[in-house]
Amino acid sequence: MFFPKPRCDDGSTPSDFPCADGFISYTRIFKYLGSHIVPGLDSTEEIKLRIQKASQAFGCLSASTFRNKDVNKFLKGRVYVALILSILLHGCETWFLREEEYDLLRLFHKYCVRSMCRVSMSQVRRHRIRTSKLLKELALQPFEYYLESRCLRWAGHVSRMGPERMPRMLLTSWCPSSRVVGRPRMNFGHMIKKFLIKLNDKLDDPDAKVWDTSLTGKAALKEQWRWTEFAAEKWDWRKIIQRTPGWRERAKAAAAAYAAQCEANRAARGDAVAGGAAPQVHAPRGGRAPQARAAGNGRYATAAPPTNVGNNTRDARAARRAAREQADQQQGGYWN
């Protein structure tokens, strides 16, 4: 998408714009639906304000929750994801981040992780404590995981919209104007492309590609919308983007453990039958004893139900109640 030259505020811009009902004041930052819009149309000011608000919320809960040694670290991580990250990443689905803004967000995330683990920078340098170890203690993921999952989830949601919807139209829109000299400005499409390239390692098929970086020219233009086929299934798309590094190894280990458990269960049942033990019969739900099927043809039974057969569950409950009352009478009642 083409972006015009950003508007510069050199003092020549009038302070007020006349209109039919009076005037409209010019402002450098405009807040709309929780997001801040600036003349340059970038995300720098928005990210700085998001970090400021998230830092205020983190400071309010530091003494009672995040830096409290009596609070479980797992609980700290859950509260951090639910509250602080929700404030920090509000509206991140429309951001386009340069490396400078990305570094600011990563630094804030690492600062919060160290604070929740009650670790200072001097201790990190002295003992060479890695951030991955602190994240594991809090059951958290690196900052890239939360940002990429939110942006890709929103991109998949837009791709599933009807072609008449405005967000869907903007996703595939383009301007028939010549490119400016130099590298184009970072935009939403570039950021989504970068996230989709990382998504190749999370697919079930190792040979499949959401975005094939080896293609160039017309072949790349033809294949650049392949990711919309994966995003067509809502729950499969969310399952893919929520996978964390090392998920293949964990899935293989879980499958091997499940197969070993099934094999052990089959071996145990075979040993029990070979030893002459009667096969174990599990009682049906409700505690009722299984009854033989009534003789007859078709759906309805023609034979009368067996007589002198009581309800096993009801009889057992009555026997327990009688034994309990007898024991209470021998001990002097419930309150002695």
Image: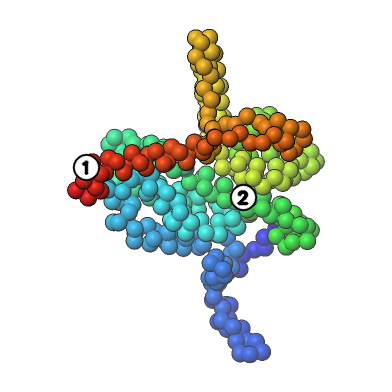
Residue 304 x, y percent position in the rendering = 67, 36
Q: What residue lies at 39% left-to-right and 38% top-to-bottom?
A: 319
Residue under label 2? 153
Q: Is residue 178 left or right of residue 237?
A: right
Q: Is residue 3 visible from the viewing direction of this image?
A: yes
Residue under label 1? 331
Q: Earlier in the sequence, mark 1 or mark 2?
A: 2
Amino acid on which disc 1 is placed: Gln
Amino acid on which disc 2 is placed: Arg
Instruction: Classify mark 2: helix, strand or loop.
Output: helix
Q: What residue lies at 65% left-to-right and 87% top-to-bottom?
A: 19
Quarter holding residue 195: top right
Query: Can you say whether 95 is above or below 69 in the image?
Result: below
Of all residues, the one furthest to the left in this rendering is: 336
Q: Nearer the viewer, mark 1 or mark 2?
A: 1
Residue 247 x, y percent position in the rendering = 54, 32
Residue 241 x, y percent position in the rendering = 59, 42
Q: What residue lies at 59% left-to-right and 55% top-to-bottom?
A: 93
How many neighbours does mark 2 have within 10 angstroms: few (below 14), some (14-19), or many (20 or more)?
some
> In this view of the protein, which residue sits in the foreground, 136 or 179?
136
Residue 243 x, y percent position in the rendering = 56, 39
Q: CA distance from mark 1 to mark 2?
A: 66 Å
Quarter holding residue 251: top right
Numbered label tally: 2
Quarter holding residue 140: top left
Q: What residue lies at 27% left-to-right and 36% top-to-bottom?
A: 126
Of all residues, the one furthest to the bottom in this rendering is: 21
Contact (CB < 8 A) between labels 1 and 2?
no
